[in-house]
Amino acid sequence: MSTNEFRVERDSMGELRVPATALWGAQTQRAIQNFPISGLKMPRGFIRALGLVKWASAGVNLDLHDLDKVRAFAIQKASLEVAEGRHDAHFPVDVFQTGSGTSSNMNANEVIAHLASQYADGAAVHPNDHVNRSQSSNDVIPTAIHLSAAMAISEQLLPALK
């Protein structure tokens, strides 16, 4: 890729070049660079569950008055797009990553924030301050794992057994 095919993202660890067309940000890019282990990506069902968890969290934060309507609805719209599989190509983090799934959680936060910022009538949507508000990877990842398993049982296993 040429220099024009990248944008510069900044976070607490400094500047980083990210592909210009990527919906993710610096933390996802760091995970791609730091954990090129297997080439296996997170499964569709897990990404779907991440989108649903972020959709529900935005609704709760709106109900608690911790998120304004414009940002909450923008996050929910983007989260449903993620749940529907419309942005799977923007979830490049290797399935074998460090710790509690922080890289996958941040990948979801960055993709959803990028999309939601386009839907928020000029209001910036931040991956941590808005999309991940009142959450941690230790909240999101186990919930997404359980939700994806429950959906797989309901939608695939039980119908196959019948």
Image (cartoon, grey):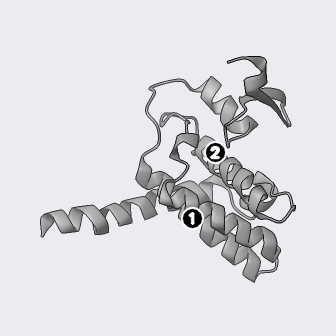
**Residue 161 coordinates in the image, percent (x, y):** 13, 65
Badge 2: residue crowd in 10 Å (few <14, some 14–19, many ≥20): many
Question: Dot 2 corresponds to which residue?
Answer: 107
Q: Residue at x 37, y 66 (%)?
A: 150
Question: Dot 1 corresponds to which residue?
Answer: 80
Q: Amino acid at mark 1?
A: Leu
Task: Give the spatial CA distance, label 2 vs label 1.
Answer: 15 Å
**Residue 52 coordinates in the image, percent (x, y):** 54, 65
For the N terminus, which image quadrant?
top right
Contact, mark 2 vs mark 1 (Cβ under 8 Å): no
Q: Residue furthest top?
A: 2
Q: Residue furthest bottom?
A: 63
Q: Is residue 62 left or right of residue 93?
A: right
Give the mark count.
2
Which label's residue is closer to the chain start, 2 or 1? Answer: 1
Give above or below for 34 relative to 56: above
Q: Residue at x 63, y 25 (%)?
A: 34
Q: Is residue 160 left or right of residue 103?
A: left
Give above or below for 44 relative to 140: above
Relative to the observer, which residue lies in front, 62 or 82?
82
Q: Secondary structure at mark 1?
A: helix
Mark toward the viewer: 2 or 1: 1
Q: Amino acid at mark 2?
A: Asn
| Residue 149: quarter of image | bottom left
For the C terminus, which image quadrant?
bottom left
Relative to the observer, which residue lies in front, 29 or 23?
23
Q: Secondary structure at mark 2?
A: helix
Relative to the observer, which residue lies in front, 140 or 44?
44
**Residue 143 coordinates in the image, percent (x, y):** 52, 62
Q: Is residue 58 left or right of residue 83?
A: right
Q: Residue at x 51, y 46 (%)?
A: 88
**Residue 48 coordinates in the image, percent (x, y):** 48, 58
